[in-house]
Image: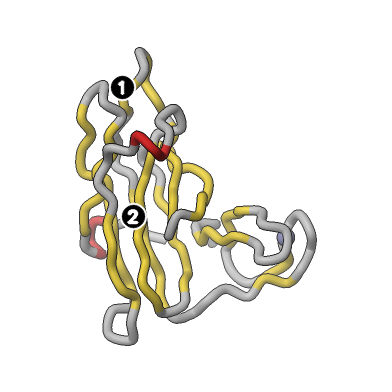
Amino acid sequence: MSKTLRFKCPKCGTVQDVSGNGPCWKCHVMISLPEDGVIWIRRMDDLIFSGGRFRRLTEVYLNGIFLNWLSNNEFIRIPVPYGHYNVLLKHPDRPMANYTGVGLEFDITPNNRVVYLKTEDTVGGSGTVILKSATAEEMPPV
Ligand SMILES: [Zn+2]
């Protein structure tokens, strides 16, 4: 099973990719993943030119909480409880105060349990990452 479920340990705060419930690799507390909904994020093959060179990694933020990185052609799923969410991807060399990308905001509810997001495009040299709604068919198999 692929380790594409991204989760932040509530005890030690370590962000990790797991395949299901199990012990945190760092502090060994048992992690039980939320089961209400799932946010999928796929970064397309979009090497980004910023700050004079190509950047492989973008930072992932969920409701302002840093959840590590996504490289081009990579995807993650984030299991979440019902609630209101905003997601944005940002280049590591861009401070949040100068954020210029396009994030997305949505609710995870019993009628909207799965949200698919993809990076659409980037504006060369600006370090801008644009998130768009996607469909299940645009996600890789797990
Ligand atoms: Zn932990």
Percent of width and height locating residue 101 = 27, 41
For disc 1, the neighbor class at 10 Å (few under 14, some 14 to 19, many from 20) is: some
- Label 2 SS: loop
- Mark closer to the observer (1, 2): 1
Percent of width and height locating residue 123 = 20, 30
Q: Horizontal placement of 6 versus 112: left or right?
A: right
Q: Horizontal placement of 75 versus 112: left or right?
A: right
- Label 1 SS: strand
Look at mark 1 in the image and give the residue it sits on: 49
Percent of width and height locating residue 133 = 21, 58
For disc 2, the neighbor class at 10 Å (few under 14, some 14 to 19, many from 20) is: few
Q: Earlier in the sequence, mark 1 or mark 2?
A: 1
Look at mark 2 in the image and give the residue it sits on: 140
Residue lying farthest to the front in this orientation: 97
In the image, which disc is placed on residue 31?
none
Residue 40 occupies quadrant: bottom left
Give me the residue at 52% from left, 51% from top. Answer: 67
User: Total label count?
Assistant: 2
Residue lying farthest to the top in this orientation: 52
Residue 99 occupies quadrant: top left
Relative to 98, is 14 above or below? below
Percent of width and height locating residue 89 = 37, 45
Give the quarter the ligand 1 occupies. bottom right
Relative to 119, is 23 above or below? below
Give the position of the N terminus as an image quadrant.
bottom right
Give the position of the C terminus as an image quadrant.
bottom left
Amino acid type shown at disc 1: Phe
Q: Is the CB–ligand 1 distance for label 2 below 8 Å? A: no
Amino acid type shown at disc 2: Pro
Q: Give whichever of 118, 52 is nearer the camera.
A: 52
Q: Give whichever of 106, 37 is nearer the camera.
A: 106
- Calculate the distance from the C-alpha at mark 1 to the C-alpha at mark 2: 25 Å
